[in-house]
Image (cartoon, helix red, strand yellow):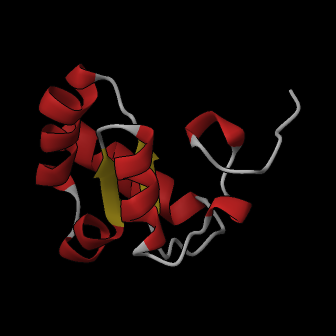
Amino acid sequence: RKLLKMNLESMTGCIPVRLGALHICHPPWFFSKIVFPIMKIVMNERMRKRVRLHNGSKEDVLGELEGFGLSKRVLPVDIGGEVVVES
């Protein structure tokens, strides 16, 4: 637990980006049931409020994201949006 907390704190201190929100769409079951709850233990309160998991059908996820002001036109095709991301 201490090592995980230390790694999360060092990553947040090194990445020169201010995180307004992090939306994770369609995570694998083990992430939402095992990994994320463990990560939440070591996250500070502000970070816990900013990270959101979205599960369910594409329509459910798109509806939840629209509640945060993220419309189809700014989301990738993979999750039902209109933006084509080339790899």
Of 79 and 24, the residue lying toward us: 79
Of 84 and 8, the residue lying toward us: 84
Task: Tell me: 53 left or right of 40.
Answer: right
The residue sitting at 72% across, 63% down in the picture is 73
Residue 55 x %, y %: 29, 41
The residue sitting at 60% across, 68% down in the picture is 71
Task: Tell me: 16 left or right of 4.
Answer: right
Q: How many marks?
A: 0
Determine the image quadrant of residue 39. Answer: top left
Can residue 1 be seen in the rendering of this structure? no
Vertical relation: 52 (above or below) 57: below
Vertical relation: 14 (above or below) 53: below
Hey, which residue is sitting farthest front in the picture? 59
Determine the image quadrant of residue 37. Answer: top left
The residue sitting at 57% across, 75% down in the picture is 18
Residue 32 x %, y %: 22, 35
Residue 28 x %, y %: 32, 23
Can residue 71 be seen in the rendering of this structure? yes
Location of the C terminus by quadrant is top right
Vertical relation: 26 (above or below) 10: above
Residue 25 x %, y %: 43, 43
The residue sitting at 36% across, 57% down in the picture is 9
Task: Tell me: 37 left or right of 53.
Answer: left
Task: Tell me: 75 left or right of 38.
Answer: right
Location of the N terminus by quadrant is top left
